[in-house]
Amino acid sequence: MKKILSNLLVVGSVAYDSIQTPFAKTARTLGGSGSYFSLSAKNFVKPSLVGVVGNDFKAIDIKILKDIADISGLEHQKGKTFHWAGKYSFDLNSRETLKTELGVFADFKPTLSPVHSLAEYVFLGNIHPKLQLDVLHQVKSASRRTKFVGLDTMNFWIESALPDLKKVLKEVDVLIINDSEARQLSKEHNLLKAAKKITTLMSARGASSNMQEGAPLARVLVIKRGEYGLLMFSSVSPSFKKRGLGGVRIFNLPGFPLEDAVDPTGAGDSFAGGFMGYLTKTNNTSWENLKLACVAGSVMGSFCVEQLGTKGLIGVTEKNIRNRLKEFKKLVNY
Ligand code: AMP
C-alpha cells in the first residue's frame, strides 16, 4: 500500500501501560490511545500525533513513534507520563481499570501548529471531552478544510464529563465506542435503541457542515463488540428514514476469528487508526467506503490483540495486512 502525504491528525494519550491478562503481564510498556492509533494508521497514511509525555518517557519509545508519525506536536513536559493499569477477565471481554495516573496529562492543553490545523481528517482520541472540543475548534477556526472528524471516548469520561462529551458529540462525524460504552451513554441495553439515541445526540450536520461535494453521512456511530465484530449505524437525513432497520442504516461486520488473542489493550484505538487511515488514504467518506474502512480497522485491531501491548502492531507488514484483508473477504462472502 502506497503512503500519501500526512493529512490525518490524531490527538490522544501517549502512555505507559501496565497490563495483566490471563496469559501475560507487562509493566510500563508503551501505550495510549494516540500511540495505538498512530501505529495502526501509519499502514495507510503517516499521521500527525499530538499529545504529551513526561521526562520519564524513554528515547526508544520516542524512536518508535518518530518512525511512524509526525511527532512535532508531541509535547515534553516535566513530570510523569500518563500511566494506565488494567486487568482482563479470562475471556478477555471485560477489563478492570486498576490505575489511571494522569501525570503530565492532567495539565495538557494542546495548541495546534498552523500545519496541523490544516488536516482534513481529524481523530479526537480518548482524552477529556473539553480538550477534544478545544482541539476541534482550533482546527475549524484555523481552516475550513476539515472533512471528517472521528471521536472516541470511554466509561471514565461518560461518568465524569458527560455535559462536555455531549457538546463535542454535536460536532463530529463519527463516534467510535464499544458496546458497554454505548449502553452507558444511552442508558439503553438494546444496541439498536442505543444507536438511535446516540445518533440523536449527535448533530445532523456534524463537523462536515463545511463540506460541499461528496458530503459524508453525518451522524455515524460505530459500536465495537470485541471479538464479535462491530455494528455501524448512520442516521442521516429524513430521506433515509425509510431505509434500513427502523430508519437507521446498519452495517454488521463479524470479528476476524483468531486462535491467539493475547491482549485486547488498544484494539479499539487500532481499529480507529485503520478506519481513519483508510478514509484519509481513499479520501472518500461515502457509506460504501465507510464499510471498507470498518474492514481495514478490524484487520488492524486483529493484529493488535495477537500480542502483548503494541508488539502486534509494530511487527505487522504490508503483506500481512493484504493477506488478512483477503481472508476477511472470504470469511464474509456468501
Ligand atoms: P483501548 O483498549 O482501545 O480502549 O485503549 C487502551 C489505551 O487507552 C491504553 O493504552 C491506555 O493508556 C489508554 N487509556 C486508558 N484510560 C485512559 C484515559 N482515561 N484517557 C486517555 N487514555 C486512556
Image (cartoon, rainbow, N blue to C red):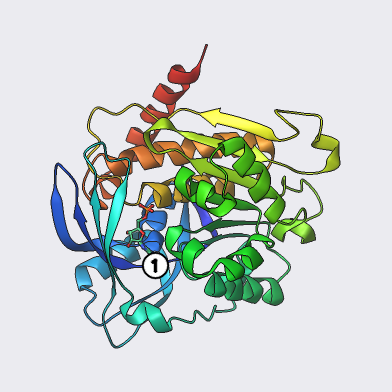
The quadrant of the rendering that contains the N terminus is top left
Q: What residue does disc 1 label?
A: 13
Ligand 1 within 8 Å of disc 1? The answer is yes
- Neighbour class for label 1 at 10 Å: few (<14), some, many (≥20)? many
Residue 329 position (above or below residue 16): above
Q: Is residue 205 left or right of residue 35?
A: right
- Quadrant for residue 261, please give it: top left
Q: In the image, 21: left or right of 330?
A: left
Q: Residue at x 69, y 71 (%)?
A: 140
- Report which quarter residue 92 is drawn in: top left
Looking at the picture, does residue 136 appear above or below residue 189?
below
Residue 237 sits above or below residue 123 on the image: above
Q: Where is residue 243 in the image (x, y as percent from the top left)?
A: 77, 29
Q: Which residue is drawn at 39% across and 41% down?
A: 300
The correct choice, above or below, for 22 with respect to 102 in the image is: above
Which type of secondary structure does the marked residue at label 1 adopt? loop
Q: What residue type is labelled 1?
A: Ser
Query: Residue 208 in the image: x percent, y percent?
Result: 73, 57
153 or 120, which lies in front?
153
Q: Residue at x 63, y 76 (%)?
A: 138
Q: Is residue 282 visible?
A: no
Image coordinates of residue 271 in percent, x first then y, are 44, 45
Locate residue 105 relative to residue 60 in the image: left or right.
right
Q: Quadrant of ligand 1?
A: bottom left
- Tell me which residue sits at (60%, 43%) in the image: 194
Query: Can residue 304 be seen in the rendering of this structure?
Result: yes
Using the image as rendered, state which of residue 334 and residue 113 is in the foreground: 334
